[in-house]
Amino acid sequence: MNPALFDATVPVFIRGLKALDACLDKAQAHADALKCDVSNILGARLAPDMFPLGRQIQIACDFAKGVSARLADVDMPSFEDTETTLAEYKARIAKTIDFLASIPAEKFAGAEAREIVILRGDTKREYTGLNYAHHAGLPNFYFHVTTAYNILRHNGVAIGKKDFIGSV
């Protein structure tokens, strides 16, 4: 039996990232059909003050690996934010999925009560593992995956709800 927070996070992150990866394949097909450079889509934003698609992908991967590593109390890999091509973003997704798949479910034992401290600049946030997963980690992951999906839709990529949800 897997600990509850493992089941609530790792498989969810993997499914979401695989769905995002499949949506990026459709973005490439869309760009090919229009005979345009897919980098135009990677740089697209929903609003001027929002991150572009490429950064949304990076942040979604960062939340998936960060939340999982903190809950499992394992070292989190560091990825440089140097991707510029669709292939590089897809490789980042694949590396993130590989990391997630490498974490044994048993490492999540007791994660609900584990103390999670997030330091960002002068701000310190303290959570229990349960609160971190449900009130910070998962919402942030879904925000960035959803924003990536919406940027793709806004740019004419033919994706729908089934693409966002992925295989269940």
Image (spheres, rainbow, N blue to C red):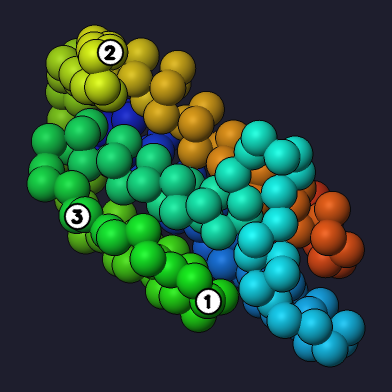
Question: In x, y percent, where is residue 17?
Answer: 51, 57
The answer to whether any part of residue 128 appears in the image is: no
Residue at image mark 3: 77
Disc sitting over residue 123 in the figure: 2
Question: In x, y percent, where is residue 123?
Answer: 28, 13
Residue at image mark 1: 85
Give the Cα separation between the discs numbered 2 and 1. Answer: 33 Å
The kind of secondary structure element at disc 3 is loop
**Residue 66 position (above or below residue 129):** below
Label 3 sits on what residue type? Pro
**Residue 36 position (above or below residue 150):** below
How packed mark 3 is, by other alpha carbons closer than 10 Å (few <14, some 14-19, many 20 or more), is few
Q: Which of marks 2 and 1 is nearer the N terminus?
A: 1
The answer to whether any part of residue 28 appears in the image is: yes
Report whether 5 appears left or right of 148. left
Residue at horizontal 75 percent and vertical 43 percent from the top:
46
Q: Camera-side residue: 119 or 144? A: 119
The kind of secondary structure element at disc 2 is strand
**Residue 125 position (above or below residue 15):** above
Residue at horizontal 21 percent and vertical 54 percent from the top:
78
Report whether 48 appears left or right of 17. right
Give the Cα separation between the discs numbered 1 and 3. Answer: 21 Å
Q: Camera-side residue: 18 or 3? A: 18
Label 1 sits on what residue type? Thr
